[in-house]
């Protein structure tokens, strides 16, 4: 297959220079000649060359003005430009190069030298395009591989979370609903600028993914306790409370085998702190106020709201209004008051998510 010839446009107001250059280059390249900058832009509407040879000293629009316009346009900015000029001072060359020219050839030029300089620059441009193509292809492969890894990661997360739900069948749908409620609360916090400095460092997608693991420690709780259809004894409740500690150990164990799963850091906070209370009477550590990580304070509201509106063997499901009132009454004791205010303001959004995931 015959190789496609490169296209070159020569811009010079001296007809002799145009003829000499074209005669020397036409054997290998398709050469177009124009006598002015204005004519160049007319030609560029039809032809996109591989290289432009541009005279500096032209009437009406000089070479510097032409190259500025070329580099300002998305359609022509990539076209390499070599200046042709009778000037040989360093200042003129520096000006041309600073405007985006790739080379400077002094007139009168030596035809063999002109040919060789063009050949070298076209080869460089071709190699640059090949490198760009390779980089683009590599980037696409990386993106595809990353997407594949993320899909696998999400599948593993979801499966692990479902294992907890299958064992604790009274909370069916709890994980999906809490993710939905968490999305509403995080979006509301962002909209209102609440705890803006801290939340700006979060990867919201990873936060939502990791929230699936907040009850993972229940895997370690015996079925006889987890599935008991009545009120727990004090001793049994202490064992249930330990799911936060068990969960933290599970996350620690997973982290030993990897250094790349950022979401495990979020998951560990959710697991360990979503049962802490604002007044310090929560578990497992009895943290108080802002000692409780913000992720834990957020999950506390989401988790309790879902527990309230869900039916249990020992209680009927609360209505949405009853659940909202219960959380309002627990502001400053169980929950962060600032988060409760946001929850109340957006409570209708919570109701919609709950209804959609019944």
Image: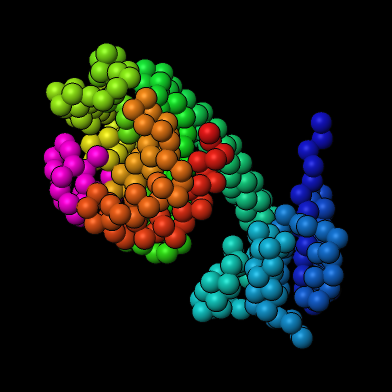
Q: Image quarter for residue 219?
A: top left
Between 47 and 225, the residue placed more toward the observer is 225
Q: State the quadrant of the N terminus.
A: top right
Q: Is residue 167 left or right of residue 152?
A: left
Q: Is residue 306 left or right of residue 63?
A: left
Q: Is residue 63 magenta?
A: no
Q: Is there any visible trace of residue 208 in the rendered image?
A: no
Q: Residue at x 79, y 46 (%)?
A: 5
Residue 112 on image: x %, y %: 69, 56
Which secondary structure is most common in the magenta stretch? Answer: loop
Q: Image quarter for residue 141?
A: top right
Specify start and end residues of the magenta stretch as a single range.
Answer: 275-296
Residue 338 on image: x %, y %: 31, 60
Q: Residue at x 65, y 68 (%)?
A: 71
* Colouring style: rainbow
Q: Is residue 75 left or right of residue 163?
A: right
Vertical arrangement, residue 347 with respect to residue 273, above or below? below
Count of all numbered marks drawn on residues in the image: 0
């Amino acid at each position: 297959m015959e190789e496609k010839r490169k296209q070159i446009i020569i811009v010079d107001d001296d007809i002799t220079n145009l003829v000499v250059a074209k005669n020397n280059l036409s054997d290998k390249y398709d050469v177009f000649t124009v006598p002015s900058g204005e004519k160049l832009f007319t030609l560029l509407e039809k032809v996109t060359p591989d290289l432009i040879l541009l005279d500096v000293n032209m009437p009406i629009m000089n070479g510097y003005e032409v190259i500025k316009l070329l580099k300002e346009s998305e359609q022509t900015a990539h076209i390499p430009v070599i200046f042709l000029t009778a000037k040989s001072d360093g200042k003129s060359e520096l000006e041309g190069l600073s405007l985006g020219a790739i080379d400077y050839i002094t007139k009168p030029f030596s035809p063999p030298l002109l040919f060789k300089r063009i050949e070298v620059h076209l080869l460089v441009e071709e190699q640059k395009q090949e490198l760009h193509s390779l980089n683009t292809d590599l980037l696409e492969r990386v993106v595809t591989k990353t997407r594949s890894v993320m899909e696998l990661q999400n599948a593993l997360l979801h499966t692990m979370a479902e294992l907890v739900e299958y064992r604790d069948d009274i909370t069916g749908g709890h994980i999906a609903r809490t993710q939905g409620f968490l999305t509403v609360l995080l979006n509301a916090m962002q909209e209102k600028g609440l705890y803006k400095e801290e939340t700006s460092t979060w990867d919201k997608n990873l936060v939502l993914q990791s929230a699936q693991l907040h009850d993972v420690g229940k895997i370690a709780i015996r079925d006889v306790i987890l599935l008991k259809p009545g009120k727990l004894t004090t001793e049994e409740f202490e064992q249930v409370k330990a799911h936060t500690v068990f969960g933290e150990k599970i996350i620690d164990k997973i982290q030993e085998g990897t250094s790349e799963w950022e979401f495990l850091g979020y998951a560990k906070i959710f697991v360990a702190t979503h049962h802490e209370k604002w007044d310090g009477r929560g578990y497992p550590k009895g943290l108080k106020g802002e000692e409780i990580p913000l992720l834990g304070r957020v999950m506390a509201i989401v988790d309790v709201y879902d527990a309230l509106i869900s039916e249990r063997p020992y209680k009927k499901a609360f209505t949405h209004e009853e659940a909202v009132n219960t959380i309002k009454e627990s502001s400053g004791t169980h929950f962060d008051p600032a988060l409760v205010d946001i929850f109340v303001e957006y409570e209708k959004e919570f109701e919609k998510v709950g209804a959609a995931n019944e």
